[in-house]
Image (cartoon, helix red, strand yellow):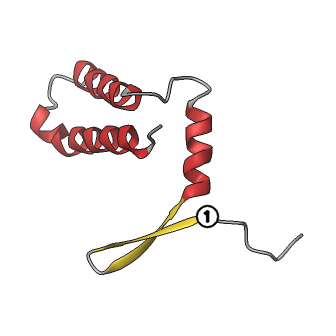
Amino acid sequence: MSSEAPNVQCLNIDISGNTYCVNLSDIKDFLQSCEKFMSIDENEFEIMTQTITDTIIDCASPDVTIESLRPQLKFLREVGLLLNNMITR
C-alpha cells in the first residue's frame, strides 16, 4: 500500500476568510459519471435540479408547506446554477 497522497488538482478559493480546495479531479469524475445518464451540455443540470424540485413539491405530504421546504428548494436552485455554469465549451 502506497503512502503517497493521491494526485489532487486543487483550485484554492477564499470565502469569508477561509481557504477551500476545489478538487478538479473530483469534478471531472462527477461530470464523467453524469454523462453516462444525462447530457452535460447547455442547461441540462438546471433542468435536472428543477425536475427534482418539482418532484419534491408534488410528492410532499399535505402537512408540509412550501415555506418549510424553502431552504432545500433554494439549495437545489443554487446547485443547478453552479453545475450549469461549472463547465463551458
At x 58% / y 29%, what residue is drawn? Answer: 35
* Within-10-Å neighbours for mark 1: few <14, some 14–19, many 20+: few
Q: Is residue 72 left or right of residue 47?
A: left
Residue occupying the far front of the picture: 89
Please name whichever residue, 59 or 63, is drawn nearer the observer in this view of the structure: 59
Where residue 41 appears, as percent x and y from the top left, is 46, 28
Quarter holding the N terminus is bottom right
The amino acid on which the numbered mark 1 sits, given as a three-letter code, is Gln
At x 10% / y 38%, what residue is drawn? Answer: 67
Where residue 4 appears, as percent x and y from the top left, is 80, 75
Residue named by callout 1: 9
Where residue 22 appears, as percent x and y from the top left, is 48, 62
Q: Is residue 22 left or right of residue 71?
A: right
Residue occupying the far top of the picture: 58
Q: In this view, does 76 lie to the left or right of 37?
A: left
Q: In this view, does 13 lie to the left or right of 37?
A: left
At x 36% / y 42%, what residue is drawn? Answer: 85
Q: Is mark 1 on a helix, strand or loop?
A: loop
Where residue 75 appears, as percent x and y from the top left, is 27, 45
